[in-house]
């Protein structure tokens, strides 16, 4: 529905005119909804749109605040462009050179009248036999090949996460997550009435002892984790740790939702599902491998769970479109996805080199193959003030608070998405941010 964008436009106009000043706090979303006579969910979309545009920043436990308006010197090429449209290091959708040209031939085949007739029919949660075989081949890695008979399909990976959790956890239930977790999982949990419980991690991933302790304190219904290139830190759960986690979840009889959406960048990582197949629900998709505009989410479920999870997919309205399934089968079968993945691995490595050059000397957690980085800011910067300072220079970054659950444990860090900006823009933005970080004594004192 487009109405929320109209409301967001009004707020944006108030910010541009100065009626809403930099640093001013917006009302809580419930109050905003009542004032504008809209649903709370619509208010959430308005605030999300304002965040996406780089106009406001939210911090858990404090609220949503107007960012400083962009004020960047003109006449310097990319800087001039950034004033008109911020360099967005919040979004993170990789795109390979020539991507559309690679994808088009397979789509042309789907548009043949005989194929299109089938492609426009409704799709079951179990997809088609061809889709199950193609997805199984795509996700197979050394040490693990999923059973095609255990596949379900959704519109995207986020919907696959929602379906898995909805099938496992009743309203009011508790789900363990890494202490820094994927922000949209927080939204999914809120909609499902689920409480997320942060579990301590270390350099090898989520700690089994911390998981066991949390479960014994108050029973968990499930565990959600990202062992392959964890977002936002890029941590890779070691094979030793995966084996230990498998033992822990089996002892606790605790179902797992394993998010592998970035795993295509590190195909040498054996999933947790290989160690605990009877408990692990694997989530993956095409949005990062291919493109977000025509995506499919994959969900590999343990034996005996397919019908229960499929019911959750249907009740949530999360089934994949048949057209997208048909396109995916062709893209996988003719090698298009494989070529895109190879190109994006090379692209990620180039962007990591740009990151290393521009942020040399700072504390940055990342992986040489990842499309994002976790930047622990130097004192006296705080995540919210640094985010606002970056926005003032036409650069959008994600404050660390977006990934936390405990309002009183807010990391002084930001996540940098490396995928969406052009390489030249990325280099410019990172150099500007490095300069901002070094100006902390002047800019950051306002946040203390």
Image: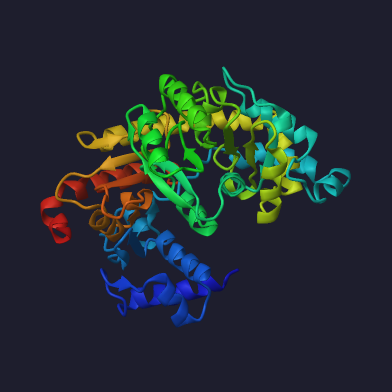
- Is residue 195 or residue 161 the one in the foreground? 195
The outermost residue toward the left is 441
Q: Residue at coordinates 47% horizontally, 24% vertically from top-left?
A: 247
Q: Is residue 77 visible?
A: no
- Tell how many labels: 0
How far across and down, in percent of the image, does residue 344 sit? 51, 33
Q: Is residue 5 above or below residue 279?
A: below
Query: In the picture, residue 274 is in which quadrant?
Result: top right
| Image coords of residue 241 (percent x, y) | 41, 23
Measured along the vertical axis of the image, is residue 68 above or below residue 406?
below
Outermost residue, right side: 114
Query: Is residue 427 at all visible to an observer of this figure?
Result: yes
The quadrant of the picture occupied by the C terminus is bottom left
Colouring scheme applied when the structure was drawn: rainbow
* x and y, in percent, of residue 187 in the image: 48, 55
Depth check: give the residue in front, 46 or 281.
281
- Picture layout, residue 382 above or below residue 434: below
Which quarter of the rendering shows the N terminus?
bottom right
Looking at the picture, how far across and down is residue 38, in whole percent? 52, 77
Q: Residue at x 40, y 72 (%)?
A: 12
Going 66% across and 49% down the picture, which residue do you hit? 312
Viewer-closest of 270 and 309: 309
Side of 408 where 263 appears, left or right: right
- Give the image quarter of residue 207: top left
């Amino acid at each position: 529905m487009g109405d929320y964008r109209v409301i967001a436009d009004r707020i944006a106009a108030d910010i541009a005119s100065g009626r809403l000043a930099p640093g001013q706090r917006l009302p809580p979303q419930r109050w905003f909804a009542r004032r504008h006579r809209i649903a709370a969910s619509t208010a959430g979309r308005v605030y999300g749109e304002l965040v996406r545009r780089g106009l406001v920043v939210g911090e858990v436990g404090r609220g949503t605040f107007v960012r400083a308006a962009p004020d960047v010197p003109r006449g310097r090429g990319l800087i001039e462009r950034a004033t008109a449209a911020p360099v967005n290091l919040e979004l993170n959708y990789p795109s390979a050179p020539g991507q559309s040209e690679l994808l088009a031939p397979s789509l042309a085949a789907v548009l043949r009248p005989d194929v299109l007739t089938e492609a426009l029919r409704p799709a079951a949660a179990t997809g088609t036999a061809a889709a199950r075989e193609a997805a199984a081949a795509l996700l197979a890695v050394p040490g693990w090949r999923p059973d095609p008979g255990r596949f379900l399909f959704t519109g995207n990976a986020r919907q696959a996460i929602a379906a898995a959790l909805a099938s496992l956890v009743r309203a009011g239930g508790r789900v363990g997550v890494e202490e820094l977790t994927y922000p949209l999982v927080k939204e999914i949990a809120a909609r499902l009435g689920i409480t997320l419980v942060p579990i301590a991690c270390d350099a090898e991933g989520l700690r089994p002892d911390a998981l066991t302790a949390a479960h014994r304190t108050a029973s968990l219904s499930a565990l959600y984790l990202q062992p392959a290139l964890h977002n936002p830190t890029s941590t890779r759960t070691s094979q030793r740790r995966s084996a230990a986690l498998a033992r822990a979840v089996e002892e606790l009889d605790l179902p797992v939702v394993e998010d592998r959406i970035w795993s295509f960048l590190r195909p040498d990582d054996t999933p947790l599902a290989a160690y605990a197949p009877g408990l692990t629900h694997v989530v993956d998709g095409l949005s990062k491998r291919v493109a977000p505009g025509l995506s499919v989410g994959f969900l590999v479920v343990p034996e005996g769970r397919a019908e229960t999870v499929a019911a959750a997919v249907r009740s949530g309205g999360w089934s994949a479109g048949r057209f997208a399934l048909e396109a995916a089968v062709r893209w996988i079968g003719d090698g298009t996805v494989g070529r895109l993945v190879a190109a994006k691995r090379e692209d990620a490595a180039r962007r990591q080199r740009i990151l290393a050059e521009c942020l040399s000397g700072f504390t940055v957690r990342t992986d040489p193959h990842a499309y994002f980085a976790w930047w622990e800011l130097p004192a006296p910067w705080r995540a919210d003030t640094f985010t606002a300072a970056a926005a003032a220079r036409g650069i959008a970054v994600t404050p660390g608070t977006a990934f936390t659950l405990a309002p009183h444990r807010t990391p002084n860090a930001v996540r940098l998405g490396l995928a969406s900006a052009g390489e030249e823009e990325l280099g410019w933005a990172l150099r500007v941010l490095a300069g901002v970080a070094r100006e902390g004594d002047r800019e950051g004192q306002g946040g203390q």
